[in-house]
Amino acid sequence: MSRSRQFRLAARPEGEIKDSDFELVTAPIPEPAENEFVIETTHISIDPAMRGWMSAARSYIPPVKIGEVMRALAVGRVIASHHPEFAPGDWVHGPFGVQEHAVSNGQDAYKIMVTGPLTPAAYLGVLGLTGLTAYFGLLDVGRLSNGDTVLVSGAAGGVGTAAGQIAKIKGATAVGIAGAPEKCRMLIEELGFDGAVDYKRSDLRVQLHKQTPDRVDVFFDNVGGEVLDEGLTRLRRGARVVICGAVSQYNASGPVAGPANYMALLVSRASMTGFVVFDFASRYQQAIRELSGWVSQGRLRSVEDTAPGDIEMFPSMLARLFTGQNTGKLALELRP
Amino acid sequence: MSRSRQFRLAARPEGEIKDSDFELVTAPIPEPAENEFVIETTHISIDPAMRGWMSAARSYIPPVKIGEVMRALAVGRVIASHHPEFAPGDWVHGPFGVQEHAVSNGQDAYKIMVTGPLTPAAYLGVLGLTGLTAYFGLLDVGRLSNGDTVLVSGAAGGVGTAAGQIAKIKGATAVGIAGAPEKCRMLIEELGFDGAVDYKRSDLRVQLHKQTPDRVDVFFDNVGGEVLDEGLTRLRRGARVVICGAVSQYNASGPVAGPANYMALLVSRASMTGFVVFDFASRYQQAIRELSGWVSQGRLRSVEDTAPGDIEMFPSMLARLFTGQNTGKLALELRP
């Protein structure tokens, strides 16, 4: 294969993502210049944040420009290098974009050690930004303490499965909110959550009350909308609400639903804080060491929804992310 | 006058407060028992929080019971005492309720020094919970720093006028949001605010943008609703949103409007924190000393909307608070 395919952003989506928002372009495999290397992509991370990167609205990072390769984190192997620190065969994690091959000068890229449960896909999951987001969101932004009760929404997703397990490792009680009975079972039986709530049932408030009888110290919200609003009714005094995302709202073309119960923050002397994991970059390596240790000890599972296939599957996989069908970290595994 | 009148809570309001939510009762003037004193009320504080105290919903303080004297802060003079620390003639501040006379064992009551600009009404304004709310909300919850830009909503109210002036004393830029051109003029010309925005004009967003070109470090919100939502669009990175109240929403009988722009917290790595001034009680006396000093030096004005009159005016004055007609701290001054 001497040619390489890539998806470029063709249009800014309105409402749901459409195939026509992307353009598939075929180009020659790039050659590395001095201090550059080329990777062959093996796994492309599919993230809720991509919806925001496609939008022109003010955000924490500039939007992808029309005509640019779609931004994505990926894992791959070096196939050619003129860079002193990267050699052919090395496994590398980096912001390589939605493409079969990428050239890099090493910026924001790092070598990964693939062995046993430390799989390439895990480096997009609990050992990548997904796990780091859960780690810093829970421990730094949420100031988790031993004995706290943690409520996680989007609990069956990549960040959610990591957040609940990290909460347990840190001595907290973990309750998840997910969108199907089998997801709720998985959280409790496979990942050790103490409780789970199915938000698609009509009695969300009753279930939440039952699963958090002593209320909640940290509410880690990935979802927004009604789930955020109901979670706010369960805050304990001094609670911390961590705003990690709002996957239920990203495709909204009309006005976003704000949390009507936000005055619970006053009643409970609570805070609601947004964060962006990139701000913790100086501590990534230390955190990945700790996360890798937990994975190697079998205390932290990387839950992945990895579809092996072809890069052409990317737009439909990304659209699927917003339907709530995936369990764990969604990634596209490229099979050459 | 050997008899005394008091308002008791007769019904929990739905939507706007009605006269029939209160019952005016006449009783003998109480006699103090051992370790008690009796005050004749001179000023009754009229506060937005009263709407919440009348409601049965979970809050930071138990609701007033049906049949109980309506809760209120007040200032008065001791007319009889069997308490070692309070003597006839002393001016006293305390939670004396909406009544012409109150008996107290001294709990939560303290003597005040009435002299010059330190008037009885000021002790319900900048020298009372109103000023303390602005003080702790801005300095502790909002972590105000020299050079910050502070946006205050409900800026022409009791807490708002105090918050903007304290921001200026602390070296910040203060921009207020109020509901009339003459209020905006007052904020700038009489209280030293750097800018003011009239939320009743149709171009709220444009005005806000113009008045906060470098965005906002602390957003002190008393209002909720659209004003909160628009203010969220102006957050600087690391901003603190202080949730002090939501006066625009207290009378809503339908669902409260949540802040649709809350994801600005993520984009700006900002926090939104609720607080209740009672939690700072151990520091009241120290703060009142500092506030009194600023008042005595002419650096902090107690802006009051004090109507002299009869206790019978209480229900209509309270209802007026939610129409946005008052400027500064609303209080009822009883003229015997």
Image (tube, coloured by chain):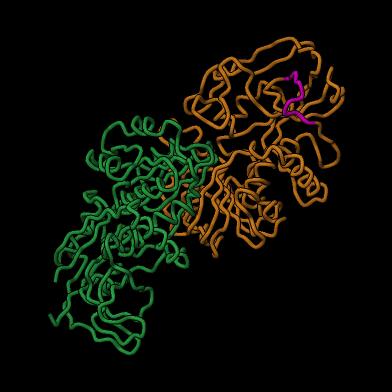
Chain colours: A green, B orange
Q: Quadrant of the N terminus of chain B?
A: top right
Q: Residue B143: give x, y in percent of width and height.
A: 62, 53
Q: Is residue A256 left or right of residue B241?
A: left
In the depicted structure, whether residue B185 falls above or below residue A150: below
Q: Residue at x 43, y 61 (%)?
A: A287
Q: Residue A312: give x, y in percent of width and height.
A: 15, 67
Q: Residue B295: give x, y in percent of width and height.
A: 79, 47
Q: Residue furthest bottom?
A: A34
Q: Is residue B40 left or right of residue B168?
A: right
Residue B329 occupies quadrant: top right
Q: Is residue B243 left or right of residue B106?
A: left
Frontmost residue, A261 versus A82:
A82
Q: Residue A104: give x, y in percent of width and height.
A: 32, 79
Does any portion of residue B80 appear in the rendered image? no
Residue B91 occupies quadrant: top right
Does any portion of residue A122 appear in the rendered image? yes
Q: Residue at x 33, y 64 (%)?
A: A53
Is B102 colored magenta in this rendering? yes
Is A112 colored magenta in this rendering? no
Task: Find the magenta span and give its range.
Answer: B100-110
Residue A105 occupies quadrant: bottom left
Q: Is residue A281 left or right of residue B18?
A: left
